[in-house]
Amino acid sequence: MVTKIIEKAINEQIRKEEHSSRIYLSMASWCQVNGFQGAAEWLYAQADEERMHELKFIHYLNDRGGNAHLSDLEKPATKFKALLDVFQQVLKHEEYISTSINEVYAVCIKQNDYSTGNFLQ
Ligand SMILES: [Fe+2]
């Protein structure tokens, strides 16, 4: 059974993974329309991957006696200056998500929830 604090932290991560998926999907669409086919395919695959991360967190939380729920999401950017701009934003976002996972991990350690800590690794 996860604590309410862990449940809250994982639900926040679920929101971030779903948001990541939508950000990459929006970038992929922009790349496809603007003739960057290879980048579009890569970003579509990233969007799927983030969706898989979201599903993993949902299944894990529900399996551990928590209650996974979805949240409102901001609309992702739909216009980009250039392909470089897209990939600079990808890098920034990946750094943000890595930091976020580390923060959830820190909460797990504080809560003595080593099972969830291991799940995050
Ligand atoms: Fe992810």
Image: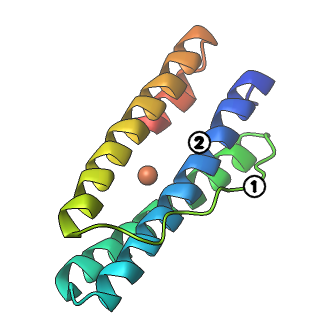
Q: Residue at x 46, y 73 (%)?
A: 26
Q: In screen coordinates, is 81 left or right of 108? A: left
User: In the picture shown, does residue 6 fall above or below 21?
Assistant: above
SS for tag 2? helix
Please state which of residues 81 and 29 is positioned toward the viewer in this rendering.
Answer: 81
Would you call the spot at circle 1 few (<14 residues within 10 Å), some (14-19), or many (20 or more)? few
Please state which of residues 56 and 95 is positioned toward the viewer in this rendering.
Answer: 95
Q: Percent x, y for residue 8?
A: 73, 32
Give the spatial CA distance, label 2 vs label 1: 13 Å
Q: Percent x, y for residue 94?
A: 34, 46
Q: Residue at x 41, y 65 (%)?
A: 49
Specify the quadrant that holds the C terminus.
Answer: top left
Q: In screen coordinates, is 38 left or right of 114? A: left
Question: Residue 13 got which mark?
Answer: 2
Earlier in the chain: of badge 2 and badge 1, it is: 2
User: In the picture shown, does residue 57 fall above or below 36?
Assistant: above
User: In the picture shown, does residue 120 fall above or below 33?
Assistant: above
Q: In screen coordinates, is 27 left or right of 53? A: left
Evaluate if marks 2 and 1 touch, with contact meaning CB atoms under 8 Å apart. no
Q: Residue at x 59, y 42 (%)?
A: 13
Scheme of colours in the image = rainbow
Would you call the spot at circle 2 few (<14 residues within 10 Å), some (14-19), or many (20 or more)? many
Specify the quadrant that holds the N terminus.
Answer: top right
- Quadrant in the picture for residue 42: bottom left
Q: Residue at x 27, y 82 (%)?
A: 41
Q: Percent x, y for residue 32?
A: 31, 88
**Residue type at mark 2?**
Gln
Question: Residue 72 got which mark?
Answer: 1
**Residue type at mark 1?**
Asp
